[in-house]
Image (tube, rainbow, N blue to C red):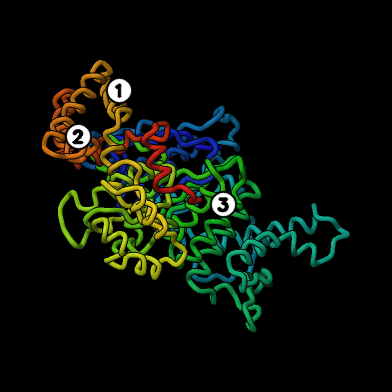
């Protein structure tokens, strides 16, 4: 099964939350955000809803589930609703395996069994009720593996098979998964379940050391892999929810683990991960690139959950990744560079302050974030600074990211064809129009602005106002294509004609917040600007 939407009312952190439009193709759903933003509360809602839906009953704890300070919801069915793709199952077993949840409290430091007991069906197992409770399952999964092995020996396994083949039948898929995550760690065997029942491992010259000697990160990863391998033997058509799978692991291990979990999940199932880990997010980005449509990202950061919030899968662009990295790395996010960097004109941060610092770069980031999500524009000073690399940006970027491609770009201004040719020989791109304002105030962009306000009848009047502003600029001694000098007048006339509010306090903020998003790939101005900057690049 795959979830299409979830709604929560006055539940935990949420007053009114709607999660909508999860794609049916999504095999992995990432809930991203800092600690305390509500990721675990979402899983609490799903877990509580599932207990009630499958007929296990539900203890509506008034101190835990309702959001304090809001009208109390009397029952879980009024607080949480879940919509799946396809028809809702009616078979009780299909309902039981529709959702499987792991809490963030999975510590199982050691165990050793001296007897085997019959274990209940995985479908009937109820280990916890709330996401704050402990969820240690390694010893339970050991019992399940060993018990099933005894059953197979006497009832169902091929009597002509060798001992080696039987052992591979019992733990072979777990061994393979562990080897892919930890190439130097080998799962040897299950020991003697009636005397020293535990998992035994080998690493380097050390052989047959038991589970308790694994590191914290190895135990955490082994737990999740073991549990998934055991569960998918009986669970298909399932939504697996894992809260903070990255605990106790370094970022490289986090990525390997997510890759393995992604591979283990059946195509008819879905994996929901709540995380703020850089390793998990980087691997999710890689999976999204290699498997288009298979990963959906839900951003819980900077949400006011005291008000109604509608969350849909994020457009995966540079702005989204920068925000994710700021959550995961805080101030270190600036050190994570994209694969391509364009140094353009503009006062850079650190040399000046104010809302218009890095103006051109901010506009260009917005314009091209969809088509070039791994490209970052940065301000490099005036045209001479960019050409000469006065601030040594190229060297600094290369030191931080040896694989990043660097492009330098400047305005055309009044340069002659000969000057432009010389600059191009030096590897500097030159805009074909005078400056960025010529693209942002293009007639097609202004038409799109009118359409966005449902004021199509104002198109011609707005274009006439632009012409008048340019004529006034020419009378002041400026060139007839100097849109920058006319931009202030065009901005005020546009606001007046269209009755705009909240569109920016000055012409530059107006360009960044209102015009830049309207310059899209179907427009001639976009295609020209794209050609000017990216001609011949592969990013």
Q: Position of residue 331 (x, y in %)?
A: 29, 63
Q: Position of residue 272 (x, y in %)?
A: 48, 47
Q: Nearer the viewer, residue 250 or 169?
A: 250
Which residue is found at the position 36% from the left and 31% from the top? 78
Q: Which residue is mark 3?
A: 262
3D distance between C-alphas at marks 2 and 3: 43 Å
Q: CA distance from mark 1 to mark 3?
A: 43 Å
The label nearer to you, 2 versus 3, is 2
Residue 176 vs 26, above or below: the answer is below
Q: Secondary structure at mark 2?
A: loop
Q: Is residue 81 above or below residue 250?
A: above
Instruction: Say which of 430 and 318 sits in front.
Output: 430
Is residue 311 rendered to the left or right of residue 502? right
Disc 3: CA contacts within 10 A as few (<14), some (14-19) or many (>=20): some
Is 475 located above or below residue 531 in the figure?
Answer: above
Q: Quadrant of residue 113?
A: bottom right
SS of the residue at dot 1?
helix
- Asked where in the image residue 499 lies, by quadrant, the reply is top left
Disc 2 packing (10 Å; few <14; some 14–19; many ≥20): some
| Quadrant (top left, top right, bottom left, bottom right) of the N terminus | top right
Q: Residue furthest left?
A: 476
User: Which residue corresponds to mark 2?
Assistant: 503
């Amino acid at each position: 099964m795959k979830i299409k939407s979830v709604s929560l009312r006055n539940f935990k952190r949420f007053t009114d939350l709607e999660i909508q439009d999860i794609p049916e193709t999504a095999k992995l759903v990432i809930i991203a955000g800092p600690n305390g933003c509500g990721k675990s509360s979402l899983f609490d809602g799903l877990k509580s809803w599932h207990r009630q839906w499958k007929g296990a009953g539900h203890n509506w704890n008034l101190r835990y589930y309702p959001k304090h300070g809001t009208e109390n919801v009397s029952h879980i069915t009024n607080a949480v609703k879940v919509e799946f793709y396809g028809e809702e199952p009616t078979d009780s077993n299909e309902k039981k395996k529709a959702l499987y949840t792991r809490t963030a409290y999975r510590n199982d430091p050691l165990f050793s069994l001296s007897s085997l007991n019959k274990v209940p069906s995985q479908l009937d197992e109820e280990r916890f009720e709330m996401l704050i409770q402990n969820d240690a399952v390694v010893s339970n999964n050991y019992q399940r593996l060993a018990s099933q092995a005894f059953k197979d020996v006497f009832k169902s396994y091929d009597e002509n098979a060798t001992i080696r083949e039987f052992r591979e039948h019992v733990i072979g898929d777990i061994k393979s998964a562990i080897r892919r995550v930890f190439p130097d760690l080998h799962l040897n065997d299950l020991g003697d379940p009636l005397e020293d029942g535990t998992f035994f491992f080998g690493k380097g010259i050390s052989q047959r050391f038991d589970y308790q000697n694994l590191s914290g990160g190895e135990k955490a990863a082994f737990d999740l892999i073991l549990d998934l391998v055991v569960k998918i033997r009986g669970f298909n058509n399932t939504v697996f929810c894992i809260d903070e799978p990255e605990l106790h692991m370094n970022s490289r291990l986090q990525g390997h683990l997510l890759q393995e979990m992604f591979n283990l999940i059946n195509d008819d199932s879905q994996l929901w991960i709540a995380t703020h880990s850089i390793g998990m997010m980087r691997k999710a980005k890689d999976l999204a690139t290699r498997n288009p449509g298979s990963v959906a990202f839900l951003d819980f950061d900077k949400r006011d959950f005291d008000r109604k919030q509608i969350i849909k899968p994020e457009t995966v662009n540079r702005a989204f990744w920068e925000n994710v990295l700021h959550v995961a790395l805080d101030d270190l996010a600036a050190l994570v560079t994209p694969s391509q960097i364009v140094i353009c004109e503009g006062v850079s941060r650190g040399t000046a302050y104010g809302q218009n610092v890095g103006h051109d770069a901010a506009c260009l980031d917005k314009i091209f974030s969809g088509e070039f999500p791994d490209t970052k524009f940065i301000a490099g000073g005036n045209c001479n600074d960019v050409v000469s690399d006065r601030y040594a940006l190229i060297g600094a970027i290369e030191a931080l990211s040896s694989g990043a491609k660097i492009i330098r770009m400047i305005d055309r201004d009044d340069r002659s064809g000969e000057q432009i040719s010389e600059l191009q020989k030096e590897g500097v791109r030159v805009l074909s129009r005078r400056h960025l304002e010529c693209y942002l105030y293009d007639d097609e962009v202004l038409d799109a602005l009118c359409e966005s306000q449902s004021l199509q009848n104002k198109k011609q009047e707005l274009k006439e106002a632009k012409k008048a502003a340019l004529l006034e600029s020419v009378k002041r001694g400026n060139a007839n294509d100097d849109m920058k000098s006319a931009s202030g007048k065009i901005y005020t006339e546009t606001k007046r004609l269209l009755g705009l509010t909240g569109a920016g306090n000055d012409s530059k903020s107006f360009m960044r917040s209102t015009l830049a998003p309207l310059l899209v790939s179907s427009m001639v101005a976009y295609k020209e600007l794209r050609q000017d900057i990216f001609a011949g690049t592969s990013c």
